[in-house]
Amino acid sequence: MTADPEQDEKAERLRGLLGARSIVLVGMMGAGKSSVGKRLARRLALPFADADTEIEQAAGMTIPEIFALHGEPAFRDGEKKVIARLLEAGPMVLATGGGAYMIEETRAAIASHGISVWLKAELDVLLRRVRRRDDRPLLKSGDPEATLARLIDQRYPVYALADVTVVSHDVPQDMMVDTVIEALGCHLAAPGSGDET
Ligand SMILES: Nc1ncnc2c1ncn2[C@@H]1O[C@H](COP(=O)(O)OP(=O)(O)O)[C@@H](O)[C@H]1O
Ligand SMILES: O=C(O)C1=C[C@@H](OP(=O)(O)O)[C@@H](O)[C@H](O)C1
Ligand SMILES: [Mg+2]
């Protein structure tokens, strides 16, 4: 519940349209999946899970430690299993790590248990945001700008397969939440989505 009856009504309608499905946030590092996801869950009164946090808990170490000790393939393997488990436990808001949606099996699991939302941001926005922390192993070596640009080229055509796309601007995060709720409402009520009443 929020202090705003109109927001509560929108949240209730969206929860009804979702049924057992989760909202799954995908997109690049720095797009806002973890932070906007947490607020979105609060607004919708749904549980929130961050796949990265769950992987860290399952492994008993941080993501940089997993990459350093076991390498990226081991991280991806854990990520796939953790996301599959979380998707069985919906409905929830699930923030994935930036590489998760690139795995075909994970995309299929997301499509059958959830609605995917791509938080899409420009390179300069991402770069500014990821510079605030240094806990992303893929950006630790080399030039982060060049790495992000390469990953954008590889990943954006795949992220574009998501059900809904929302552009992530540097606006207050609660505004991002409003935009995501609006976009999901339109998507789920659209003819052909199988959800129209
Ligand atoms: N709409 C926004 N405007 C400004 N900063 C944002 C916005 N969304 C996220 N951020 C900030 O960007 C950084 C990365 O966000 P995060 O949620 O960790 O992204 P992701 O999980 O997609 O990598 C954080 O410092 C967060 O506070
Ligand atoms: O893009 C990626 O491959 C990764 C993104 C990170 O999550 P965020 O997208 O939440 O930063 C985290 O899963 C890991 O460092 C790898
Ligand atoms: Mg995150």
Image (cartoon, helix red, strand yellow):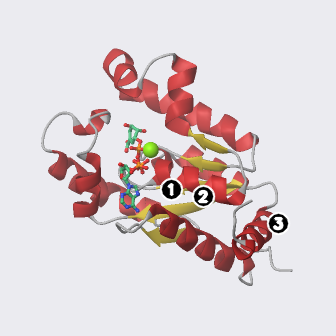
Amino acid under disc 2 = Leu
Q: Give the labeled residue for mark 2.
A: 40
Ligand 2 quadrant? Answer: top left
Is the CB of the residue bearing disc 3 within 8 angstroms of ligand 1? no
Please indicate, yes or no, whether residue 161 appears anywhere in the rendered image. no
- Quarter of the figure with the N terminus: bottom right
Q: Give the labeled residue for mark 1.
A: 36
Seen at 40% across and 66% down, the residue is 168
Disc number lying in front (1 or 3): 1
User: Please, what secondary structure does the residue beneath circle 1 have?
Assistant: helix
Q: Earlier in the sequence, mark 1 or mark 3?
A: 3
Tag 1: Cα neighbours inside 10 Å, few (<14), some, or many (≥20)? many
Seen at 37% across and 62% down, the residue is 156
Q: Distance between the residues labelled 2 and 1?
A: 6 Å
> Are dots 2 and 1 in contact, CB under 8 Å?
yes
Please indicate, yes or no, whether residue 190 appears anywhere in the rendered image. yes
Give the quarter of the image for residue 191.
Answer: bottom right
Q: How far apart are marks 1 and 3 (CA)?
A: 21 Å
- Residue 16 marker: 3
Farthest residue toward the front?
3
